Amino acid sequence: MHPQLTEKKLGSHPPPAVFCNAHTRHNSVALTHRVLIVCLDFIQALDACHANGWSRWTGACNQAKHDLNMCLRKERIDRTTKNREDAKSRRVKTEQAWKDLHVDE
């Protein structure tokens, strides 16, 4: 398995529920941990394919790599969609706060 995806590394971080504040510097760790859990089967399948030396060079692992990429892509799209919706709601709140501020003047 890739060094950054080892079981030791996966188990070294607290579960994502610990990072409930979206503005902590550890939010990316929680996100990475979540994506690794969701796509863990695909990561392990690709790693198993790469364990056979010739498979990785002859294209036998292409489907496993594609499946992992699609899993990671889906997670990224879900994350960006949620972030976009959150940004819109924050923008509405900000605009309302500015309107309320100018009404008081």
Image (cartoon, helix red, strand yellow):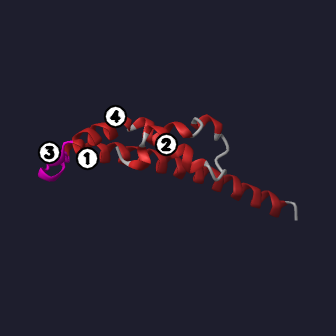
Q: Alpha carbon of mark 4 to alpha carbon of mark 2: how far?
A: 16 Å
Characterize the magenta stretch by its predominant secondary structure. Answer: helix
Q: Is residue 66 found left or right of 17 in the rendered image? A: left
What residue did someone put label 3 on? 60
- Determine whether the residue tagged by mark 2 lies in a helix, strand or loop: helix
**Which numbered marker is on residue 7?**
none
Q: Give x and y (percent) for residue 52.
A: 19, 42
Q: Nearer the viewer, mark 1 or mark 3?
A: 3
Residue with the mark numbered 1: 65
Mark 1 or mark 2, whichever is nearer to me: 2
**Residue type marked 2:** Lys
**Magenta residue check for 56:** yes
Q: Which quadrant of the view contains residue 101?
A: bottom right
Q: Residue furthest right?
A: 105
> Looking at the rendering, in which quadrant would you find the N terminus?
top left
**CA distance for labels 4 and 3:** 17 Å
Residue 14 falls within the magenta-colored stretch? no
Q: First in sequence: mark 1 or mark 2?
A: 2
Residue 80: percent from the left, percent from the top? 48, 51
For the residues marked 3 and 2, what is the alpha-carbon distance in whole angstroms?
A: 28 Å
Q: Residues within 10 Å of mark 1 (few under 14, many from 20)?
A: some
Residue at 59% from the left image edge and 53% from the top image edge: 87
User: Left of 32 or right of it: where is 51?
Assistant: left
Q: Are marks 4 and 2 in contact (CB under 8 Å)?
A: no
Element on which disc 4 rests: helix
The magenta span reads 52-62
Q: Earlier in the sequence, mark 4 or mark 2?
A: 2
Residue annotated with mark 2: 9
